[in-house]
Amino acid sequence: MTVESLSDRIAAVAIPETLLDHAPELFGVYQDYAHAVRESAEESLSPRLYAMVRLAVALAIPSAPLAREARRLAEERATAADIAGAVNAASHLRSGAAIAYGRLVFKLMEGDQPGAAEAGTRSQIARDREYMTKLRKASPKAFDAMARLTTARQTHSVITPLEYEMIAIAIATVTQCVYCLEVHGNKAKEVGATEQQIADAVHIAIAARYEATVLEWAALG
């Protein structure tokens, strides 16, 4: 199958007839949206990066049917190293979202509700760092081993910082991690991402969530 024919298939999104026949207007609107997302993202990010982000999002949702479709597209547009980088990014970012929220267990155990005066003298970032420190002190061996995941990615990355941040924003959208969205949105700007690129990464995630649900339903048989 050529890249063009596969792209057309992805853009159309194969809605099962059992759904499309009974609600053509509803699912037709989604097909239009999926096409617009692909077209815009391929222009702003490149066809290669669109495929990489889509694959990473499918893995992060996670949706096996969507991942299979996304993998086929990625294998036609990207190198094996690109795909390895996208898979690693998806894995790293899924665990990163868990880290961001996992540290809050210490906040919730303490019932930390700072008053207005305290909030004015200590930023939320500073308080969150304190909870991260507590997480490390509670189990230093595991924490330090976890920290090496980030060090390894930064030292041996096979994708560019901009590519990583586009994947990160898309995955933060599907994992609904506010911490991750803030961090990676700012990092994306630092590495030169445009607002359109950031928005397109978000749209890839939105479209993928919709498509993944439809494909999961179809997989039920």
Image (cartoon, grey):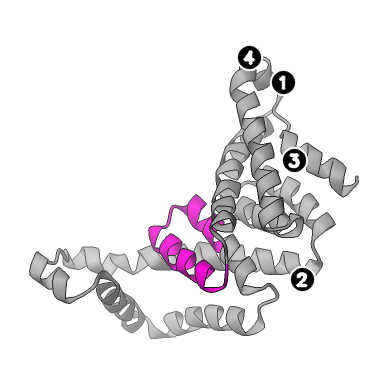
Can you say which quadrant of the picture contains the N terminus?
Answer: top right
Of the residues shown, which amino acid type is indicated by label 2? Answer: Ala
Q: How crowded is mark 2: few (under 14 residues within 10 Å), some or many (20 or more)?
A: few
- Can the viewer see residue 48 in this picture? yes
Per the model, the C-alpha gap separating discs 1 and 4 is 8 Å
Dot 2 and dot 4 residues touching (CB under 8 Å): no
Q: Is residue 47 left or right of 180 when viewed as pictured?
A: right
Give the amino acid type for the residue marked by disc 1 in the picture: Glu
Mark 1 is surrounded, within 10 Å at the Cα level, by few (under 14), some (14 to 19) or many (20 or more) other residues, namely few
Q: Mark 1 points at which residue?
A: 17
Within 10 Å of disc 4 (Cα), the crowding (few <14, some 14-19, many 20+) is: few
Q: Which residue is drawn at 31% across and 77% down?
A: 129
Which one is in front, 87 or 48? 48
The magenta segment: 168-192
Q: Which of marks 2 and 3 is nearer the N terminus?
A: 3
Mark 4 / mark 3, whichever is N-terminal: 3
Q: For the residues marked 1 and 2, what is the alpha-carbon distance in whole angstroms?
A: 37 Å
Badge 1 element: helix
Per the image, label 4 sits on a secondary structure element best described as: loop
x, y (%) of residue 59?
Answer: 62, 54
Q: Read off the residue under disc 3.
A: 10
Which numbered circle lies on residue 22? 4
In this picture, is 18 found above or below 142?
above
Which x, y percent locates residue 112?
17, 66
Q: Is the magenta stretch mostly helix, strand or loop?
A: helix
Instruction: Quickly name the residue at label 2.
Output: 81
Instruction: Choose between 187 and 51: the one closer to the eye.
Output: 187
Mark sitting earlier along the chain (1/4): 1
Q: For the C terminus, which image quadrant?
A: top right
Can the viewer see residue 55 in this picture? no
Q: In percent of the image, x 86 and y 41: which residue is there?
A: 5
Viewer-nearest of discs 2 and 3: 3
